[in-house]
Image (cartoon, rainbow, N blue to C red):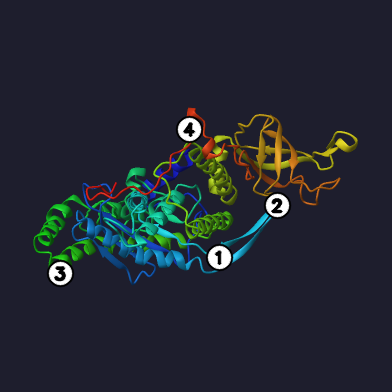
């Protein structure tokens, strides 16, 4: 936890309401998101009990497995879920745009992409597990499932993996998104309770955030937001209802399970949409649009792979695939951190406190300074900034600035509250700097050791050339034979 976040939490305790950690919204919100609230059976890693889903707050759709241990009912449920999610996902593929690329062939990208909003990180993990449980199923042969089930599994796996990509908004956990923008007067572990978190941010009239959070601890008022259910509900309500269905297999018993589950999901459904409304009230940060473009590009590429008949994602990445994925996520993290800081003065303040960034006023500038002679002559302006911030960047460090994105400066010296910088990138290509490219004396500026620039991917061997020290070439990973006793895990 940063110093600024700790201070915000202390202020939340004192004032009784959550404190803002951001001035703008750092995640994309779709005009038509799909809210998905999953429940699983207690004691089972990935046995689905129910899902409430929909794009209209007034019209949720409830899918229930009256006996989660029944394999046929589970996969019938998966087919129903595919009937809800796949049309929504496939509808986003209809409108496309042509994207031109320098030095590469243009490609088609979807104009929009699906956005699945779940209550919390546990629900997002359950989505990944449900994808793993369904993507290898066969539509023919013994234990055949509906053809839509393996397709659903591949999409759920893709969304679950994409959710781990920094800055992605395709699969969004409401608690994670809210915690990115507000600090409460409770622990991070307690922030995982959606009702408690929303209570701190937007308490009912006449109540403080702390009072609303205490009310949220009562499962009779606010049931858990999934995927786990309340143990008291499991023992006293759900277990007898499932037992009655198991004994009679009647519609009446199935309706009893359905109504029991609805009593748990209806309050959560309203709560997730309330969280969406809180996020919508914040203006979107400038960097959100470019990150959503990356999401749309990733979504379009995966849709094309499915259309071409690509096999399902393997259970485990090979050495090359894992290294490549890790490198992509590291580059995305670096870019995401820089974008958030450049877009938001509150986020940048955290880096100023640690000395990784500083703000001040330009007290001297040499805009026409150059280094070298003849053809080797390069424009290298010097700028001196006076600051009251702690500066903990060594000479030679490259810095970026939110005032002139794309420009880079190199630290020359730090002494007596003054930092001398040499601008090395982003001044134009002429013999003199582009007007306005070099800060003028008296101008307020901010510089940070955060660079928002393209980073080339690492040079890795082809998967078939994986050396023996890293396990050798990965084996083929066809769908495994079905087993009536296989667990959903």
Between disc 1 and disc 3, the foreground one is: 3
Q: Residues within 10 Å of mark 2 (few under 14, many from 20)?
A: few
Please report whichever mark, 4 or 1, sits nearer to the chain's N-terminal start: 1
Asked whether the residues under the numbered discs 2 and 1 touch, taking CB atoms below 8 Å apart as contact, a structural biologist would say no
The image position of residue 43, as x and y in percent, is 21, 46
How much space separates mark 4 and mark 3, taking CA atoms?
Answer: 54 Å
How much space separates mark 4 and mark 2, taking CA atoms?
Answer: 33 Å
Quarter occupied by residue 257 = bottom left
How much space separates mark 2 and mark 1, taking CA atoms?
Answer: 23 Å
Q: Residues within 10 Å of mark 4 (few under 14, many from 20)?
A: some
Between disc 4 and disc 2, the foreground one is: 4
How much space separates mark 3 and mark 2, taking CA atoms?
Answer: 62 Å
Q: Residue furthest top?
A: 469
Asked whether the residues under the numbered discs 1 and 3 touch, taking CB atoms below 8 Å apart as contact, a structural biologist would say no
Classify mark 3: helix, strand or loop: helix
Q: Which residue is mark 2?
A: 103
**Residue at figure coordinates x 52%, y 34% from the top left:** 466
């Amino acid at each position: 936890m940063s110093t600024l976040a700790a201070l915000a939490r202390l202020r939340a305790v004192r004032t009784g309401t959550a404190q803002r950690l951001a001035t703008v919204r750092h995640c994309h919100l779709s005009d038509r998101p799909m809210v998905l609230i999953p429940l699983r059976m207690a004691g089972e890693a990935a046995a689905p009990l129910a899902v409430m889903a929909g794009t209209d707050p007034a019209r949720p759709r409830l899918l229930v497995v009256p006996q989660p241990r029944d394999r046929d009912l589970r996969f019938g449920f998966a087919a129903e879920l595919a009937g809800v999610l796949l049309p929504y996902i496939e509808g986003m593929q209809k409108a496309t745009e042509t994207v031109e690329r320098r030095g590469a062939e243009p490609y088609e990208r979807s104009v929009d992409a699906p956005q699945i909003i779940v209550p919390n990180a546990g629900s997002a993990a359950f989505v990944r597990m449900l994808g793993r449980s369904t993507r290898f199923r066969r539509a023919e042969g013994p234990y055949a499932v509906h053809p839509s089930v393996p397709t659903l599994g591949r999409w759920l796996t893709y969304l679950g993996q994409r959710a781990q990509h920094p800055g992605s908004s395709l699969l969004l956990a409401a608690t994670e998104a809210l915690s990115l923008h507000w600090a409460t007067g409770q622990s991070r572990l307690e922030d995982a309770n959606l009702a408690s978190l929303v209570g701190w941010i937007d308490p009912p009239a006449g109540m403080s955030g702390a009072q609303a959070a205490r009310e949220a601890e009562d499962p009779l008022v606010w049931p858990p937001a999934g995927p786990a259910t309340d143990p008291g509900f499991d023992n006293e309500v759900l277990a007898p209802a499932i037992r009655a269905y198991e004994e009679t297999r009647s519609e009446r018993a199935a309706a009893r399970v359905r109504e029991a589950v609805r009593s748990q999901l209806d309050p959560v459904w309203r709560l997730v949409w309330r969280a969406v409304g809180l996020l919508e009230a914040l203006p979107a940060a400038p960097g959100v649009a470019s990150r959503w473009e990356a999401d749309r590009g990733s979504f379009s590429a995966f849709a094309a792979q499915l259309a071409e008949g690509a096999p399902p994602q393997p259970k485990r990445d090979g050495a090359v695939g894992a290294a490549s994925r890790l490198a992509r996520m590291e580059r995305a993290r670096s870019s995401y951190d820089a974008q958030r800081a450049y877009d938001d003065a509150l986020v940048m303040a955290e880096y100023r406190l640690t000395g990784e960034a500083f703000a001040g006023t330009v007290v001297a500038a040499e805009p026409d300074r150059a280094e070298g002679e003849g053809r080797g002559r390069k424009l290298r302006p010097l700028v001196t900034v006076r600051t009251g911030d702690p500066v903990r960047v060594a000479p030679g460090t490259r810095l970026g600035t939110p005032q002139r994105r794309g420009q880079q400066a190199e630290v020359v010296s730090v002494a007596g509250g003054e930092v001398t910088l040499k601008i090395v990138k982003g001044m134009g290509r002429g013999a003199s700097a582009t007007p306005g490219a070099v800060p003028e004396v008296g101008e307020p500026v901010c510089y940070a050791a955060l660079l928002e620039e393209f980073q080339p991917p690492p040079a890795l061997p082809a998967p078939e050339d994986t050396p023996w020290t890293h396990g050798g070439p990965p084996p083929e990973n066809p769908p495994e034979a079905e087993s009536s006793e296989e667990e959903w895990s």
